[in-house]
Image (cartoon, rainbow, N blue to C red):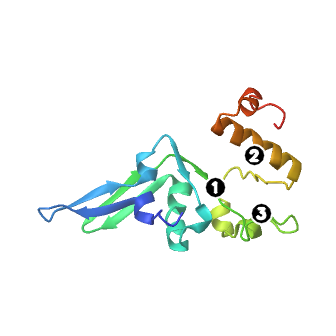
Amino acid sequence: GKGSSAAGLTASVVRDARGEFYLEGGAMVLADGGIVAIDEFDKMRPADRVAIHEAMEQQTISVAKAGITTVLNSRSSVLAAANPVFGRYDELKSASENIDLMSTILSRFDLIFLVRDVRDEDRDRMICRHVMGVHIGNSRGAESGGGGFG
């Protein structure tokens, strides 16, 4: 989310104690061959979101800073989670309108899953009782073993 910067996701050039520059790979470089999970993707600054375009499309990250010019591999899958714009999914709007992300970034994902919390007071109450019972140590909640509401 807001804590994810372009440098933290891609790469940055850092100066050490002797004043020399070195390259430090971000999450997408470190996850080369694996998975990068980004939560609160919708809350990232637009400039930081744009910075991962190359990584998602080309599976590389180009760096040209402080006399260091290179291309790093970022052959990773990106799993990102985002919330609806107004806190609740509006079925009358498209996914991109609900998530409020540019189509250029949405098009870089192979799959988009919508996970909706359908309002159901009885079901919510049953889940709440089960969770509270498990954490408080209520034998009735613990014995139910999660059954009945899934």
Indicate the position of residue 57 as horizontal and vertical percent values.
Answer: 56, 56
In whole angstroms, how far apart are the C-alphas of marks 1 and 3?
13 Å
Name the front one of labels 2 and 1: 2
Query: Is the residue 38 above or below the residue 1 in the image?
Result: above
**Disc on the earlier residue, 3 or 2:** 3
- The tag on residue 3 is none
Indicate the position of residue 136 as horizontal and vertical percent values.
Answer: 64, 39
Q: Give neighbour class at mark 2: few <14, some 14-19, many 20+ (Cα, 10 Å).
A: few
Camera-side residue of 101 and 84: 84
Residue 46 appears left or right of 118: left
Kind of residue at disc 1: Ala
**Disc on the earlier residue, 2 or 1:** 1
Residue 107 appears left or right of 11: right
Q: For the C terminus, which image quadrant?
A: top right
Indicate the position of residue 58 as horizontal and vertical percent values.
Answer: 52, 55
Would you name the residue on which mark 2 appears?
A: 128
**Disc on the earlier residue, 1 or 3:** 1
Residue 128 appears left or right of 55: right
Query: Is the residue 148 above or below the residue 17 in the image?
Result: above
Say what secondary structure mark 3 lies in.
helix
Contact, mark 2 vs mark 1 (Cβ under 8 Å): no
Would you name the residue on which mark 3 appears?
A: 95
Q: Give neighbour class at mark 3: few <14, some 14-19, many 20+ (Cα, 10 Å).
A: some
Residue 118 appears left or right of 112: right
